[in-house]
Image (cartoon, grey):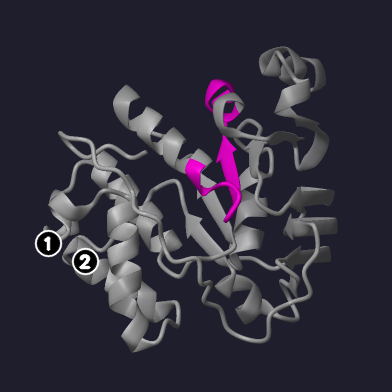
Amino acid sequence: MIMSEPEARGPNEHDKTRHWSGAPPAMSMSAIIAKGVSKRYGPTLALDSLDLDIDRGEVFGLLGPNGSGKTTFIRLLAGYLLPTAGRLEIDGCDSVRDSLAARARIGYVPEAAPVYGNMRVREFLAFMARLRGLPGRQVGGAVDRVIDMLALGAVAHRPARVLSRGYRQRTAIAQALVHDPPVVVLDEPTNGLDPRQIIEIRELIRGLAGHHTVIVSSHVLSEVARIADRVAILLDGRLLGVRAMADTPDLEAWFLSVA
């Protein structure tokens, strides 16, 4: 449950209708499938033949130091980049051949959590809902849903530029959820938050599991250990291993043993 500042507010049950463009893909057990995915920046190989399956409804952690390939993979998922080689499938859609449909299935929160400071929170979320292709008659309900889910009611009519770091992060997550995507990608979601806000975001992420597949990128092992069902370790663009947290009592020891 997300806590408002200063008092707690519980999220209501939200509408589970998903909004995306194009025909729905054939369902499979995997939300994300990467087969031999590589990405080059000139002579630099940022991602090296990545093979990875991420299950529907799980919270999946990406671990690795700066320069490990985490951000490159996330940008490939979000459609900001195209792979140099290999195939990347998002909720049944090829990220290259069906790029628009694949991007419609993603909600993305980058590390910087950008919001338009001159817009009020509700206005910003409505703008993002329309940008995501929601019909006009559905925008109001979608905005109400994420405002309630993220406990943003107290700041819904405030300009984003005056928000605290915690409220800005919630607003950024709300825009990623406003079109109810099957896959949510969070890059360093607790970066810069105080301990109370970290706990609140952690509880939110666990609450998204099941209805959404959540991919969390972080270099903070303890945070990933608390929220992820499975964890992958990347180093120098290569996948070093994937483990279920239930089978990994000491994530730090495993990380050090492979990285």
Q: Secondary structure at mark 2?
A: helix
Magenta segment includes 217: yes
Residue 24 occupies quadrant: bottom right
- Name the image quarter holding the N terminus: top left
Residue 222 occupies quadrant: top right
Magenta segment includes 105: no
Q: Answer left or right for 203 relative to 235.
A: left
Marks 2/1 in contact by CB < 8 Å: the verdict is yes
144 in relation to 205, above or below:
below
Q: Answer left or right for 133 relative to 234.
A: left
- Name the image quarter holding the C terminus: top right
The answer to which of 45 and 228 lies nearer the viewer is 228
Q: Amino acid at mark 2?
A: Arg
15 in relation to 149, above or below:
below
Q: From the image, tell me which residue sits under label 1.
A: 157
Q: Answer left or right for 148 relative to 199.
A: left
Q: Answer left or right for 248 relative to 136.
A: right
| Residue at 28% from the left image edge and 55% from the top image edge | 148
* Badge 2 or badge 1: first in the primary sequence: 2
Q: Secondary structure at mark 1?
A: loop
| Residue at 45% from the left image edge and 83% from the top image edge | 133
| Residue at 81% from the left image edge and 22% from the top image edge | 258
The segment highlighted magenta reads 207-224
Residue 40 occupies quadrant: bottom right
Q: From the image, tell me which residue sits under label 2.
A: 122
195 in relation to 124, above or below:
above
Q: Amino acid at mark 1?
A: His
106 in relation to 4, above or below:
below
Q: Residues within 10 Å of mark 1 (few under 14, many from 20)?
A: few
What is the distance, in whole Å, between disc 2 and disc 1 at their CAs? 6 Å
